[in-house]
Every structure is written in structure tokens, then in C-alpha cells.
Image: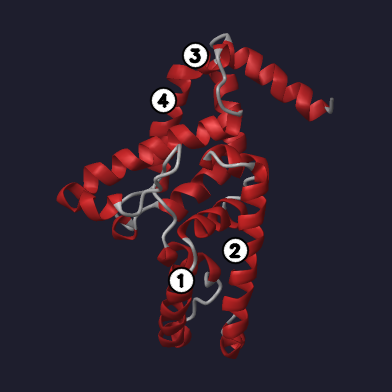
Amino acid sequence: MTSDGIEVGDLLRRAAAGDEQAVNELFARHRDRLRAMVRLRLNRRLQGRVDPSDVLQEAFLEISKHFADYARDPKLPFYLWLRHITGQKLIAVHRQHLGAQMRDADREVSLYRGALPQASSASLAAQLLGRITSASQAAARAELQIRVQEALNGMDPLDREVLALRHFEMLSNAEVAEVLGIKKSAASNRYIRALERLKDILTGLSEFADLA
């Protein structure tokens, strides 16, 4: 085992024994990944109204409260447990802020096991076009984002979700399979198919390459 592995193991033992500092250190190691997940899956109508840091803070409080229970019976790998708790807090934020609009938000929630707010085509397109930021490029960027969204909407919803998990959240193939409750081979095949589709999308938009 590597020294880092030994350190993580020690932190997990300390956290399970009630050491709040150890819980904080473990959470801090994954904070950036969790923040990226929240930003990707935060409903577009709430951007600017909800700070991802607030979602993470609520998640951390819940994780601290239930860490000992998790340690006694870890049904999920550690990071996926952190992600699940954070995702539940994100769902609560959607319900709190969207109110009567929640019916529309529900359409964006995956029906698969461990459902979280789905990464919308708008969020994925924004991630792909993140480097195009100057004011002089705004009109072309808006046009390009619509075209990318339309292309992403043409993908199988599960393929698009696998793409979000692997390409944007950086989960492993095994983690994706665990999150979605599908076989590893199915997760791998869907990711390959999604990458091919993404490549086709970007190749078809090559006339905008100078914007990047």
C-alpha cells in the first residue's frame, strides 16, 4: 500500500471514531470534484441564485453527522457516498427554489438508481464551450451553444449521462456502473458510443475552431 493509501486509511479510522478534523480532511480531498458535480447538475434557472459552496456546506454537515454509520456499513465506495449525500442536498435545493416549477425539474432527474439531477444538454454544452468567453465572441458562442445542445439532445439519454459521469465528473468505469446500476461492460460500451458522438459533434463545428 502506498503512503497516501496508509494516510487515507488512518483518516477513515479516525473519522469513524468521531474525529471531526479527519472528516474535514477527507471531505477536503474531494471538495473540488464535488463542486464540479454540483455546478454541472445545478438547474440553469438557479445559477446565480445558488452558490455551490452552500450546497457543499450542507453536504459536509450531513456527512459529519452520519460518518460513523457509513463506516459501520459502507454500502458504497467512499467517494460515491460523498457524491450521493451531496446530490441529495442538491435535489433539496432544487425543490426549495423551484417550488411549483419542480415538475419541469423532475424531467431532468435520472430514473436510474441513485438518481441525481441530470446534467442537462445546456450544462454540458457550457462545459464544452467554457473557453469561449470574450464579449466579441458572444453572438457566435450563443449560436454555437444552441447547436451543441441540439446535438447533445439527439444522444440517447443514458449515453449522455454516462458521458457526463466519465468525461466531466471523471468517475471511473466501475464507479459509473455502480452509480447507474448497470454492468461495467454496458457502461464502457455506452461511454465509447458517447465519445464517438461527441467527436462527431465537435468535428461538425470545426468552422468555429478559431473561437477556442
Residue 173 shown left or right of residue 70 in the figure: right
Task: Give the camera-side residue of 140 and 163.
Answer: 163
| CB within 8 Å, label 2 to label 4 | no
Q: What crowding class fits label 4: few (fewer than 14 Cα within 10 Å), some (14-19), or many (20 or more)?
A: some
Q: CA distance from mark 2 to mark 4?
A: 34 Å
Residue beneath disc 4 = 62
Residue 172 shown left or right of residue 83 in the figure: right
Total numbered badges shown on the rendered structure = 4
**In the rendered structure, which disc, 4 or 1, sits on the residue that comes first in sequence?**
4
Q: CA distance from mark 4 to mark 1?
A: 37 Å
| CB within 8 Å, label 4 to label 1 | no
Residue beneath disc 3 = 69
Question: Which residue type carries mark 4?
Answer: Glu
Residue beneath disc 1 = 154
Question: Which residue type carries mark 1?
Answer: Gly
**In the rendered structure, which disc, 1 or 3, sits on the residue that comes first in sequence?**
3
Task: Give the camera-side residue of 154 and 132.
Answer: 154
**In the rendered structure, which disc, 1 or 2, sits on the residue that comes first in sequence?**
1
